Image (cartoon, helix red, strand yellow):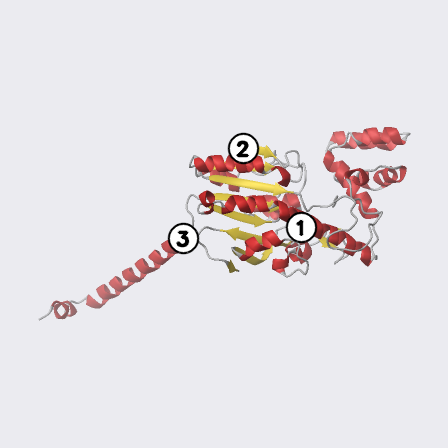
């Protein structure tokens, strides 16, 4: 009598056989899960790039008719491109805290400028990297209430560098140094390169439009920040009554501005406001002078935005060169995205923060992972 025949005579043979099958199936499933959960690039460097205000709807690789971003779209073609990625808010502050915490704005509650900092119970992305032995670097604006470095964004960063897309070289130098020393690095790069206003300077011909320059659309810093009696009248009647005056100092300054007797005194008092408040006053004044029905004006401003994207795209070539370096390409993940988009009267508004239509919330998400083939998701 064979062993199998003897076992079949055993009273609990069928139950034992079923148990063995269950164990084999569980082991197989566990093995598959473990394989799928295995990091694609363990201990790789990670670069996260936030191209503030970049709408996916204005990129040719997302179907836009203008070739605004040849370098970025070539990078997308050669890597992983998510076709339907949406920000959690059309506002810089809310959206970045969602990126950093993987929480919705109504959960992390970082939706008002100059309010309480992020709750300590929430862990941020750089904190996770640093806890796992990474060197962490922030490169972007330092005194920025919309991306505040004193309310939670700064948590977990070893190095904080002031920079713009024109001065990312310091971050690249530190990144390369860390790589040579075998220190895995998380690098955050943030830029306002395509954020309004579009101060491209006066040109004989703009890249994406033949429309003449519009006198109500500033093209230089001096034009954007130009003051006048009409400007101060607008500021006093409408803007200074808004809820962005968060501090007692701002409210006291607003009172002095209202009481000022001359434009020289108004300008001196106005210049004592923070950059945030002055920017809001200037951009709101610009919007007040734009037409709600002039389609040519909307097309002209949209063309300036597209030109800003093209200019930024040329500057991104340095980043792509960095990641294509053979010493870095095999151990560096690069993630490119945006916090929100931009609109040009598609739904009755300019710029962003007014609604949740795709123009304001659909953003690019493009990822390079060493060894992963190009794909669209």
Q: Can you identify the residue that label 1 sits on? A: 310
The residue sitting at 44% across, 36% down in the picture is 180
> For the view shown, which residue lies furthest in the right direction?
261
Could you tell which of marks 1 and 3 lies nearer the N-terminus? 3
Residue 345: percent from the left, percent from the top? 76, 56
Give the left or right position of residue 63, taking residue 328 as reference. right
The residue sitting at 68% across, 39% down in the picture is 113
- Regarding mark 1 in the picture, which secondary structure is present there? helix
Q: Can you identify the residue that label 3 sits on? A: 37
Q: Looking at the rendering, in which quadrant would you find the N terminus? A: bottom left
Label 2 to label 3, Cα distance in Å? 31 Å
Give the left or right position of residue 81, taking residue 303 as reference. left
- The residue mark sitting in front, 2 or 1, is 1
Could you tell which of marks 2 and 3 lies nearer the N-terminus? 3
Residue 317: percent from the left, percent from the top? 58, 46
Residue 49: percent from the left, percent from the top? 57, 45
Give the left or right position of residue 297, taking residue 108 as reference. right
Q: Quadrant of residue 11?
A: bottom left
Could you tell which of marks 2 and 1 lies nearer the N-terminus? 2
């Amino acid at each position: 009598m064979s062993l199998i025949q003897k076992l079949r005579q055993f009273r609990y043979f069928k139950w034992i056989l079923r148990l063995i099958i269950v164990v084999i199936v569980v082991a197989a499933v566990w093995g598959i899960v473990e394989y799928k959960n295995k990091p694609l690039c363990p201990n790789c460097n990670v670069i996260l790039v936030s191209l503030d205000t970049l709408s996916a709807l204005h990129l040719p690789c997302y179907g836009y008719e203008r070739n605004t971003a040849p370098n970025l779209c070539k990078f997308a073609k050669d890597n992983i491109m998510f076709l339907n990625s949406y920000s959690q808010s059309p506002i810089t502050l809310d959206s970045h805290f969602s990126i950093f915490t993987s929480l919705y704005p109504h959960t992390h509650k970082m939706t008002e400028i100059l309010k309480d900092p992020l709750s300590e119970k929430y862990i941020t992305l750089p904190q996770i990297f640093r806890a796992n032995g990474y060197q962490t670097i922030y490169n972007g604006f330092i005194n920025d209430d919309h991306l505040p470095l004193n309310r939670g964004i700064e948590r977990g960063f070893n190095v904080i560098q002031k920079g713009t897309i024109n001065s990312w070289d310091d971050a690249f130098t530190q990144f390369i140094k860390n790589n040579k020393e075998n220190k895995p690095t998380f690098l955050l790069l943030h830029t306002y390169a395509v954020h309004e206003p579009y101060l491209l300077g006066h040109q004989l011909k703009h890249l994406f439009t033949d429309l003449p320059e519009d006198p109500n659309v500033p093209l230089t810093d001096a034009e954007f920040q130009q003051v006048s009696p009409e400007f101060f009248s607008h500021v006093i009647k409408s803007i200074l009554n808004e809820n962005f005056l968060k501090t007692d100092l701002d409210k006291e300054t607003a009172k002095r501005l209202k009481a000022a007797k001359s434009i020289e005194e108004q300008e001196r008092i106005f210049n004592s406001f923070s950059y945030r408040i002055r920017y809001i006053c200037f951009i709101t004044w610009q919007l007040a002078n734009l037409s709600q029905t002039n389609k040519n004006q909307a097309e002209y401003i949209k063309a300036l935005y597209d030109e800003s994207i093209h200019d930024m795209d040329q500057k991104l070539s340095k980043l792509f060169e960095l990641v294509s370096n053979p010493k870095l390409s095999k151990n560096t993940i690069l993630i490119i995205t945006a916090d929100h988009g931009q609109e040009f009267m598609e739904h009755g508004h300019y710029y962003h923060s007014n609604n949740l239509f795709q123009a304001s919330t659909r953003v690019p998400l493009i990822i390079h992972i060493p060894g992963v083939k190009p794909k669209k998701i």
